[in-house]
Image: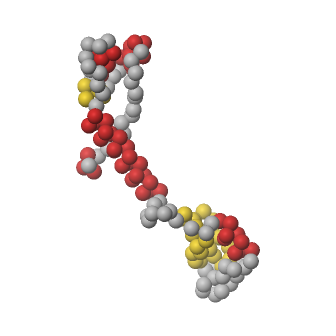
Amino acid sequence: MIAFDLQCSNGHTFEGWFEDGQSYEKQMEQGLITCPICEDTSVSKIPSTFAIKMPHKGVDSSDNKDELAVISNNILNFIEKNFDDVGCDFAKEALKMHYGVNEPKNIRGVSSREEEKILEKEGVQFYKISVPTRSDTEI
Ligand SMILES: [Zn+2]
């Protein structure tokens, strides 16, 4: 469902609900849309304000933002739970595993640009993710 903000020629504004944009156009053409206040049929759409009704309630741009935050928090939580934090030794530890000195495991940590170059040269597979700042109070 799409809600359009509509305005009649007398300046009354009201909300009209339609299946989609096409059904609005159709009803408009047939003069089926009337102002609920003065029953005027010359109604026009107020541009740029519309809402698309989603299957579950309360989805707007700010909620999407929240969902994204939840998703990225989940990824961070997953990494924190499943990857050992080796901190600044990331490159060293990665190389040790690469050469079979240490048992392979998931590690996370920080590395400098120079260290990354060495890892690339040695053919060590690693992924770089940027860690968004998050407030720990939310968790
Ligand atoms: Zn009106």
Q: Position of residue 125 (x, y in %)?
A: 40, 21
120 relative position to 108: left or right: right
Q: Position of residue 29 (x, y in %)?
A: 74, 74
Would you say residue 92 is visible in this rendering?
no
Quadrant showing the N terminus: bottom right
Q: Position of residue 135 (x, y in %)?
A: 29, 46
**Front position in the image: 98 or 126:** 98
Residue at position x 31%, y 19% in the image = 94
Residue at position x 26%, y 13% in the image = 101
15 relative position to 34: left or right: left
Residue 137 vs 1, above or below: the answer is above
Residue 132 vs 101, above or below: the answer is below
**Front position in the image: 12 or 124:** 124
Residue at position x 57%, y 75% in the image = 15
Q: Position of residue 130 (x, y in %)?
A: 39, 34
40 relative position to 137: left or right: right
Image coloring type? secondary structure
Residue at position x 40%, y 27% in the image = 127
Quadrant of residue 87 within the rendered picture = top left
